Image (cartoon, rainbow, N blue to C red):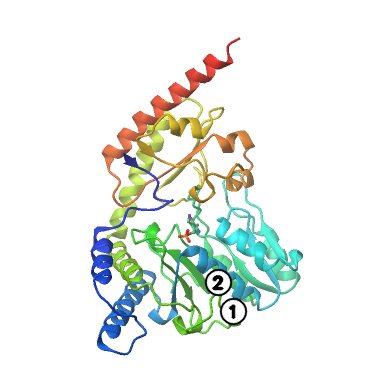
Amino acid sequence: MVYLDYNATAPLRPEALEATLAALHSVGNASSMHHLGRGAADRVDAARRQLADLLSCAPGEIIFTSGATEANNLALRTAYARGGLLVTTAVEHPAVLEAARAVTAEQPASLVVLPVDGDGIVDLEPLDAALHGGKVALVSLMIGNNETGVLTDLVPICKAVHDAGALVHTDATQYVGRLPLDLREIDVDLLSLSAHKFGGPQGVGALFIRRGTSLPHRPLLVGGGHERGWRAGTLNVAGITGLGAAAEAARLQLAHEAAQTAALRDTLEAALTAQIEDCRINGALVPRLPGVTSITFPGLPADAVLAAMPHVAASDGSACSSGAPSPSHVLLAMGHSRDDADSTVRFSLGYATTQRDVERAVAATTEAVRHVRSVMAATAEP
Ligand code: PMP
């Protein structure tokens, strides 16, 4: 199997597997005062430092969660409670868009959704209008899109939003561990991430809350007061330990992995566009994450293409919405027709992808497209 679905989930890094297993073999609740409890708490502290080192923030600015979905929900719920508008974009992951709709359900007019252009770049004019037109509680913009990889330059946006007295949240789930991210330079107030996108275990993530950020206390889960009261519940020590190990491995190998992944992605795109007539790469002209390519094969249903290449694991749109009958909201927001959105395949590469994987994926895709075209031509005949 050629695995090109890193944006759905990345394979566990060996360092993360080893660290997670070691933690699973140890007994101890990180809240217990005895020696074994201290051991568990030490593992969590170490992981917090490892993640903080990856992000260039302080360990005390990290709240461990069950993943980016929870981190996004916590960020939006809490920051929206400041009062004012919640501004986000049409291409966010459902874990932001649905959370935004949920927290603004009683006042739908307080939700502003920014459109994007044909390349997936956010239109900042309505953001400017919102910032100058009244009170904004939070602006939530993803830094790297999960379907197309299109990047958002947050530095100027943070400045404008802060000048207006609002906060910035970013869903950095697809960016962390794939490209260097320095929170001393990117001045967001809140940032969400998920361990399994950069080689940690599934079901664990974090919300970064910048020190000094003034936020109403609105945890999603209340109970034992863990994570400084922001997230009650016994800590997932093994998962957090694995997250920490993956963060450290990513930090040490990031520069090399990003360059290698981008080169392989470029090879994949060059080969597919050379060999398959008419195919189109979405967001090709703008800066993107290194490992993602979203390719439209006009007239060919993506699910049929993928079914014809069972040894390549890729995705038709975002994995989180697979099974849902609706086409990708990201591609529709970029102006694609419903048919084109349904004819789009996402390949996502990562730290362990090889040249051989790419060669096999190119051969399989070319053959699958040829097969689907011939089946469609045959069924179209009278
Ligand atoms: N945000 C983005 C951009 C994502 O790609 C994902 C996962 N597909 C999530 C949030 C949700 O992450 P998780 O399912 O790990 O909570």
In the displayed orientation, state which residue is furthest to the bottom: 33
For label 1, the residue is: 218
| Residue 307 coordinates in the image, percent (x, y) | 44, 32
Residue drawn at the location 38% of the way across and 72% of the way down? 236
Q: Is residue 179 at least partly visible in the picture?
A: no
Distance CA(mark 2)–CA(mark 1): 8 Å
Residue drawn at the location 35% of the way across and 38% of the way down? 267
| Residue 45 coordinates in the image, percent (x, y) | 33, 80
Amino acid type, mark 1? Arg
Residue drawn at the location 46% of the way across and 30% of the way down? 305
Of residues 158 and 175, the one drawn nearer to the viewer in this rendering: 175
Of residues 136 and 171, the one drawn nearer to the viewer in this rendering: 171
Classify mark 1 as within 8 Å of ligand 1 or not, answering yes or no: no
- Give left or right: position of 241 versus 127: left
| Residue 298 coordinates in the image, percent (x, y) | 55, 29
Using a 10 Å C-alpha cutoff, classify the residue at mark 1 as few (fewer than 14 neighbours), some (14 to 19) or many (20 or more).
Answer: some
- Give left or right: position of 238 versus 107: left
Secondary structure at badge 1 equals loop
Secondary structure at badge 2 equals helix
Mark 2 or mark 1, earlier in chain: 2
In the displayed orientation, state which residue is furthest to the top: 382
Of residues 222 and 317, the one drawn nearer to the viewer in this rendering: 222
For label 2, the residue is: 74
Instruction: Classify the position of the N terminus by image quarter.
Output: top left
Q: Quadrant of residue 257?
A: bottom left
